[in-house]
Image: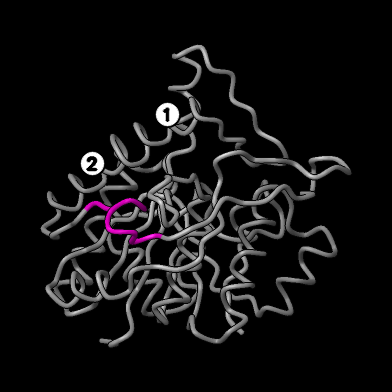
Amino acid sequence: MSTRPIVVKLGGEVVGGPVGAAVAADVAALVARGERVVVVHGGGPQATSLQKALGIVPNIVGGRRITDAATLDVMKMVVAGKVNVDLCSQLMAAGARPVGLHGASSGVVKGVKRPPRVVSGGGPDPIDFGLVGDITGFDEALLGLLLGAGHVPVLACLAADASGQTLNVNADIVANQVASALGAAHLVLVTSTPGVLRDVKDPASRLRTLTVAQAKAAIADGTVTGGMIPKLEESIGALADGRVGAIHIVGDVGVGDVVKEVAEAGAVGTALMQ
């Protein structure tokens, strides 16, 4: 057992299903043996579905959601609402004691509105992403209080600025930065793929471990493509200050797989380390 916490991030696509239930069981098992666990989640697929149902056309540039006022309302309803509640329900069913939180929960996730910037896939001009935030910090005292009492903080991917304005933030960014802020021993990213693959069509081509240098080379030579690029880049950044022990990318996990990956780097997914 480590005194350093473990951060587990789930994409919205797995919450509510068998993968979410398996992760919840593993989180409960980790807490039962004395580990301190923080859970972070997204909700992109559910947000897109609700936007379409409400007649709002999703505006996504370079893989990033532009967030106007109507879209932010959708994110509040989906991410801080249904997805957070569903995940807390799965954790409770597994025997854990979750506490659902979002940025406006005493400023537990602090942020500022992101200024316009040029992004890959977005053309040559700076893009104004609207009510999207860059993280400036966390209420580490609140998280420590909950963790010390045996609770599992469940963070929705919403930040808030000093005035209480809610801001949309990518869940991978929240997970990586809270892992760094807390000095996590492990950050486990639960995705729709089994890890970093040499061949995206062949699950057997999974790379068990990657150093930061190897990950940068895999991006540069085209081994890593698509949505895995920003995921790896964010993780490389989180490892840069040396506060996170290892980052694990796993997918389609069953009960026991997250526990196994934490115990043995690369046993189930891809472990990224310095």
Q: Position of residue 23 (x, y in %)?
A: 30, 56
The secondary structure type at the circle numbered 2 is helix
Q: CA distance from mark 1 to mark 2?
A: 15 Å
* Numbered circle sitting on residue 85: 2
N-terminal label among 1 and 2: 1
Tell me the number on the disc at residue 74.
1
- Label 1 amino acid? Val
Mark nearer the viewer, 1 or 2:
1
Which residue is located at x 49 percent, y 44 percent? Answer: 168
Q: Which mark is residue 172?
A: none
Query: Vertical placement of 134 versus 16: above or below?
Result: below
Q: Quadrant of the C terminus?
A: bottom right
Magenta stretch: dominant SS? loop
Residue range (magenta)? 100-109
Residue 106 lies within the magenta run: yes
In the image, residue 8 above or below residue 43? below
Residue in the image at 44% along x and 70% along y: 187
Q: Residue at x 13, y 51 (%)?
A: 92
- Looking at the rendered structure, the secondary structure element under dot 1 is helix
Quarter of the image for residue 213 reads bottom right
Q: Give the left or right position of residue 266, taking residue 166 as reference.
A: right
